[in-house]
Image (cartoon, rainbow, N blue to C red):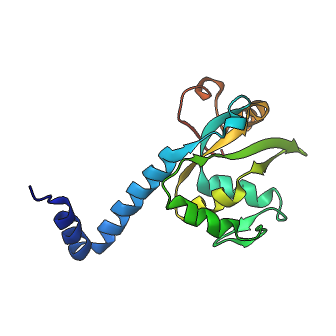
Amino acid sequence: MLSLMPILLAYLAGKYPVLFKKLVGILHYFDIQNRIKLAPCDEDDHVLIHFEVSQFDELYRSSGKDWYIGEGGTGAVIDDRYNRFLEFLETGKSIHASSICFEERDNQLVVGFVNGRHRYAVMRDMGISYIPMGVLKDSLPILEKHGFISNSSINQPPVYAMVS
């Protein structure tokens, strides 16, 4: 039996290229998001929270320029980690969630990456609007205080967080 899927996809790509590109992007986004899991070493002391990227990135940028990775892997990058993660995404393997923590400095919320800022930057640059990241459980009261999450939503996956 002849599969119609390749014919349909070719038709969509030729007839509606913008729509086809968006559809492929959405499918790629869900594939990536479903592959993100807490690293085994983070499972006991982290919670997976989906952060709204544009608002999270403002906080990340304002928390310290010495660690910020700009668009396209510019700024405070280490070697070729940004490009290596781009290549890794194509393998289809599971992805360890970035590990982040929050603290207050002068009554301002500050975010820091324990691990995974290159992974975050790649996914941000791909246009993913919500990125799951592992948050240290010690940071949860600070997140709740600043309106990122409510206490009742912490153990109800997925948890979506937005800067208020």
In the rendered view, tell whether residue 28 sits above or below residue 134. below
- Residue with the most extreme left position: 1
The answer to whether residue 130 is left or right of residue 40 is left
- Residue with the most extreme right position: 106
- Residue with the most extreme top position: 152
| Spot occupied by residue 136 in the image (x, y as percentages of width and height) | 75, 36
Residue 144 lies in quadrant: top right
Residue 107 lies in quadrant: top right
- Seen at 62% across and 37% down, the residue is 48
- Seen at 64% across and 29% down, the residue is 150
- Residue with the most extreme front position: 1
The answer to whether residue 31 is left or right of residue 143 is left
Residue 84 lies in quadrant: bottom right
The answer to whether residue 6 is left or right of residue 135 is left
In the rendered view, tell whether residue 37 sits above or below residue 3. above
Q: Which part of the image, by quadrant, shows the C terminus?
A: top right
- Seen at 79% across and 68% down, the residue is 76
- Seen at 68% across and 71% down, the residue is 73
